[in-house]
Amino acid sequence: MSMRTALLLLTALVVLQCQASSPEPVQKCRVIVLTDIEADPDDTQSMVRLLLYSNVIDIKGIVATTSTHMRNQIHPESVERVIRAYGKVKVNLAKHEAGYPDAEALLKLVKRGLPEYGMKGIGEGRDSQGSEWILKVLNENDARPLWISVWGGANTLAQALFKIQKTRSEADAQKLVAKLRVYTISDQDDTGIWIRNNFPDLFFVVTPGGYGGSTWSAITEFAPGFNSEVISNKWLANNIQQGHGPLGAVYPDVAYGMEGDTPSWLSLIPNGLNAPEHPNWGGWGGRYELFKPALADMDVNGFTGGVPIEPETRAIWTNAIDRCAPYLYGDYGRAIRVDSTVRSGNKVTLWRWREDFQSDFAARMDWCTKSYKEANHPPAPILTHPGELSLQPSEPFWLDGSTSSDPDGDNLSYVWFQYPEAGTYKDLIKINGSENLARLYITAPEVKQKQTVHFILKVTDKGSPPLSRYRRVIVNLMPKQNG
């Protein structure tokens, strides 16, 4: 079997493992977190949220690292403090969903990077607990890719890659690198560009340049036309910090921005929308496209914490543009309508989901202290047809989520919408009827060559807080056959 064939088979397997395309459980995505915790309170905030999803994300390691904001210190003890708080609520969390790991098991996954900044921590004799742990997990007999979620500097990953390059054959090194998926919250040391330049085939999601131009920063910014109350200090106090047990109590106040690191792993949550292998399809962590950005487009004058901005030498997964008109809820008549104002930009790719994932966060925080009956749980969207359809020109078809259900018996709301940026067919297709019906009738348009269209079903319960799950339907539009 050629290496190319093997990689294609691996990718196909990954799609099955990491993309939630049915209500049945899916295999968890593996992740190692690199965190400069204590450089900013937001790492602790993101750690609290991550542990609430530790039953659906396979945490393989948490490495305390440096960054440009904390150049010669690491704080694994701060990671351990959050895990111990999680340990006090783990039993109650397990009443709501299965699969939560014991705190003791998570504590064994906390590792130390070198207390050195950037490239000073790279080279012969610069191995650390963290870099060796990345290599250990990467060498495990596991077909799933290994996501590296970088919340600070990337030099622990860079050292692991340096060692692979120095100690493995070219073929073995390619196989190992092919298993990695990296998302860095901008470049917070000078090793990010070194990694991209020296490993041009590495799957890499990043917004180079100033933080203000990044997609990830949308999680904490006021969003015109979208609900920004869900990131307010009052909302955090009421829904996360106070009255939600020991884990909420360790969630610190915002100093610079709320949870800037969380977008690096939000798209690993199996919610029916997220498709980690396809950043261009969009999800809770934003949408990204594969291209080589021009230096002039990198917000070169923006804040970087002193990390130099260099030209990219290869294609990376980076900022993409969505156009979105938010849904408004009506007091009378049709339950929803589309806002007349369309918002656009790379931040919209995350803003459009923010109310949903904040409500999901609040619900899981409720799980820390409430009984199953007292809390809310996400609905289960179910399609009556396959998640991928192939249609001829003018062929009518139904989109049908009418058999969806809710574990708490809550009433359900439905919204069907086309996601033009996720497919190749960019024109909006007319929907016959109201988009908030469980079943929609649509007629396929004519195309001159095969095109793809993505339709998203969003099902939301009326529990408190309301929770949403999704199903993605990919429609292949086929050209008219001659004869």
Image (cartoon, helix red, strand yellow):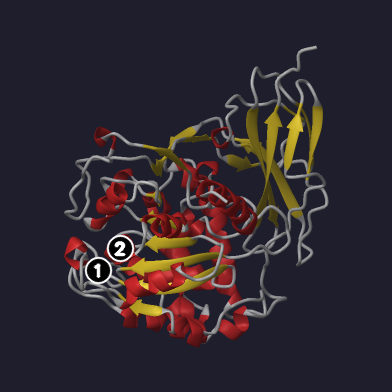
Q: CA distance from mark 2 to mark 1?
A: 7 Å
Rendered residue at 28%/47% (across/down): 197
Vertical order, 327 against 36 (above or below): above
Vertical order, 147 against 77 (above or below): above
Q: Are marks 2 and 1 in contact (CB under 8 Å)?
A: yes
Instruction: Of the two numbered discs 2 and 1 on the same chain, state the one appearing first in sequence.
Output: 1
Where residue 176 appears, as percent x and y from the top left, is 43, 60
Rendered residue at 66%/76% (across/down): 98
Rendered residue at 32%/79% (across/down): 76
Q: Is 465 on the left or on the right of 149, as rendered?
A: right
Vertical order, 412 against 473 (above or below): below
The residue singled out by tag 2 in the image is 152
Along the viewing direction, whichever of 299 and 188 lies nearer the viewer: 188
Where residue 221 appears, as percent x and y from the top left, is 38, 50
Rendered residue at 59%/65% (across/down): 28
In terms of secondary structure, where does tag 1 sit?
loop
Quadrant for the C terminus, please.
Answer: top right
The residue singled out by tag 1 in the image is 66
Mark 1 burial class by Cα count in 10 Å: few <14, some 14-19, many 20+? many
The amino acid pointed to by label 1 is Thr
In terms of secondary structure, where does tag 2 sit?
loop
Where residue 380 appears, as percent x and y from the top left, is 73, 58
